[in-house]
Image: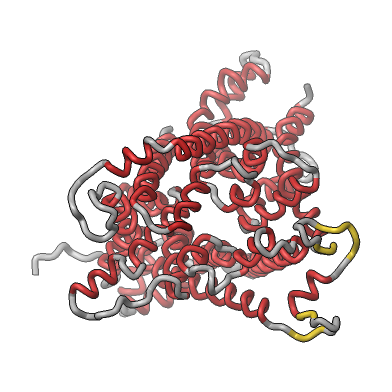
């Protein structure tokens, strides 16, 4: 067997599986989004742009179209919550990553391992643990009421704040890890030099550290933003399914709403938003490298 | 003040903030585990140690079936994903350059990039379009795809750190390529392969969204069962199953971590 043939034989099964189970399904999804919905679920095999019209318009009884922003509101809410969650994880993750990166090596390995452990535990369970804390009879409300701070339980669960809390909790490790990787490579003698030259601790952070770890900041932000945008479990369990985000809306099209083409169109919109985020950041990264930056 | 000398790179408040962060990360899980041993149904008031809820789930045949389904799916998906990912990593790292190598590297990562709900919907549409109805087989197929990158990454990382000169020495000493692979490369690669397999296993056992969309009625895995229970409200049985799943995840990941670090 020639080396060339062996290489192709080695890669073929993986390509076949990814092709059949990832690429082909996306093509089918795109095709389904352009067909007419069958009222029993599934599709009728002829062309229709109805799914995309439905994104923006509501069809009245007399077949006239009226602008309907309700789906755009859900899309905007998803973007807003994902953006906010990214911003919060950035503020929370940076001090943690910085602290870990300035520890001795053996401590670093342990701390980073402790950061990754929750990522490998079940997402449902992690989110459920916040239901136990935030619900009306949960830990926070019990403590507040026992302390006489409030008579009525404070509504914490099933709010947008609860969704944000859950997302930050789930995806903060995604921010800490790339930030840590950047910070670990940073030559901290530069910070010492800055301090020697009468720069304050925060000045050194702003003028020396932050510009050098920008790739880590960008990578972490993307790693958090992308899954937050498509998050399903946190909005479902902590948001109570009232303040819909896009993934819940997609799931509904395949269950109770039985509108497969619309669900497929929404999934494509979500995929397009993710690809746009990734492409923009990749292009900016390439440009920064080409300019001889970092 | 009796304080240790601060390094010049330290920033005020970062130490305290980091410990707070770890508390935030672990407190909810600790709370969940503690109350799985509570004597009453309460999730907030401690009323004594008891194994009631563990006895309850141990006697529940539906939970057992769900756990068995989860294990069957995870073992099958992991076995397939690990074998093909090992072959792929060897081809990408030790093979000759081939047309479309860069695209292939990207394609292997697609399951990590595409939002889970999108993969879930697309897979459901594929299965419905070709009328595939294999029960657990549907779930296994869906899991194989997203398990591949989780298995591939540690194997590839191990290959990158391995000294290729040992393999070249074997070839110099008239070992055939097949003998070299079997007696030199694969044994050296073993920790990476086991580490990748363990990560794939955990990812499969914990998967919820894709399983939820492609599962046929009756093919219930543990996360699907837990979700069904959650819909009915908070209960200590959920805490007990969660604790068991958490323990399994932590053990498997720790094992994988130790294997990756071994030289």
| Identity of the residue drawn at 32% across and 53% down | B32
Q: Which corner quadrant holds the C terminus of chain B? A: top left
Location of residue B113 with respect to A276 vertically, above or below: above
Q: Is residue B162 visible?
A: no
Taking the image as shown, residue B11 lies to the left or right of residue A233, namely: left
Residue found 57% across the figure and 25% down from its top: B185
Q: Position of residue A232 (x, y in %)?
A: 55, 62
Q: Quadrant of residue B168?
A: top right
Q: Is residue A48 left or right of residue B152?
A: right
Residue A36: x, y in percent? 84, 64
A180 or B242: nearer the eye? B242
Identify the residue shown where x is 26% and y is 47%.
B37
- Image coordinates for residue B214, horizontal then vertical, percent: 65, 47
Residue sticking out furthest to the top: B174
Classify residue A52 by image quadrant: bottom right
Left or right of A150: which side holds A99? right
Residue B138 coordinates in the image, percent (x, y): 67, 40
């Amino acid at each position: 067997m020639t080396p060339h043939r062996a290489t192709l034989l080695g890669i073929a099964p993986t390509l076949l599986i990814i092709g059949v189970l990832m690429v082909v399904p996306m093509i089918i999804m795109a095709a389904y989004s352009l067909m007419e919905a069958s009222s029993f679920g599934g599709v009728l095999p002829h062309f229709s742009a109805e799914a995309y019209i439905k994104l923006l318009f509501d069809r009245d009884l007399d077949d006239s179209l009226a602008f309907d922003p309700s789906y755009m509101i859900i899309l905007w809410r998803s973007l807003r919550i994902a953006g906010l969650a990214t911003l919060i994880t950035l503020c929370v993750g940076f001090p943690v990553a910085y602290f870990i990166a300035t520890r001795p090596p053996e401590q670093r390995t342990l701390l980073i391992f402790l950061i990754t452990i929750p990522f490998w535990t079940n997402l449902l369970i992690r989110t459920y643990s916040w239901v136990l804390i935030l619900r009306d009879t949960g830990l926070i409300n019990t403590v507040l009421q026992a302390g006489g701070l409030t008579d009525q339980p404070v509504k914490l669960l099933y709010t947008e704040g609860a969704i944000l809390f859950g997302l930050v909790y789930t995806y903060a490790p995604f921010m800490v890890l790339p930030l840590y990787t950047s910070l670990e490579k940073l030559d901290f003698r530069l910070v010492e030099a800055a301090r020697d030259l009468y720069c304050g601790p925060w000045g050194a952070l702003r003028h020396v550290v932050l510009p050098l770890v920008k790739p880590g900041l960008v990578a972490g932000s993307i790693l958090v933003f992308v899954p937050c945008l498509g998050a399903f479990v946190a909005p479902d369990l902590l948001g109570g399914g009232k303040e819909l985000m896009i993934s819940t809306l997609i799931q509904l099209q395949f269950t109770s709403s039985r509108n497969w083409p619309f669900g497929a169109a929404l999934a494509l919109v979500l995929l397009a938003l993710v690809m746009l985020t990734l492409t923009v950041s990749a292009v900016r990264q390439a440009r920064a490298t080409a300019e001889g930056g970092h | 003040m009796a304080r240790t000398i601060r390094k010049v790179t330290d920033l005020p408040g970062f130490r305290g903030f980091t410990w707070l962060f770890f508390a935030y990360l672990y407190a909810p899980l600790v709370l969940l585990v503690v109350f799985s041993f509570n004597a009453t149904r309460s999730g907030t008031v401690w009323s004594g140690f008891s194994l009631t809820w563990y006895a309850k789930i141990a006697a529940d045949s539906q939970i057992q079936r769900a756990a068995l389904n989860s294990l069957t799916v995870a073992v099958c998906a992991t076995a397939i994903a690990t074998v093909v990912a090992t072959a792929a990593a060897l081809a990408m790292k030790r093979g000759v350059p081939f047309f479309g190598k860069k695209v292939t590297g990207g394609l292997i990562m697609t399951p990590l990039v595409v939002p889970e709900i999108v993969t879930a919907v697309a897979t459901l549409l594929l299965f419905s379009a070709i009328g595939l109805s294999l029960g657990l087989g549907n779930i296994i197929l869906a899991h194989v795809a997203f398990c591949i990158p989780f298995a591939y990454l540690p194997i590839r990382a191990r290959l990158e750190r391995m000294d290729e000169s040992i393999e070249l020495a074997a070839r110099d000493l008239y070992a055939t390529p097949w003998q070299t692979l079997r007696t030199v490369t694969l044994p050296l690669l073993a920790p990476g392969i086991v580490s990748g397999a363990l990560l794939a296993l955990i990812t499969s056992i914990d998967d919820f969204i894709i399983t939820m969309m492609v599962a046929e009625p009756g093919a219930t895995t543990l996360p699907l069962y837990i979700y069904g229970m959650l819909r009915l409200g908070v209960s200590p049985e959920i805490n007990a199953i969660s604790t068991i799943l958490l323990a399994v995840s932590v053990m498997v990941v720790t094992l994988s971590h130790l294997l990756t670090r071994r030289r």
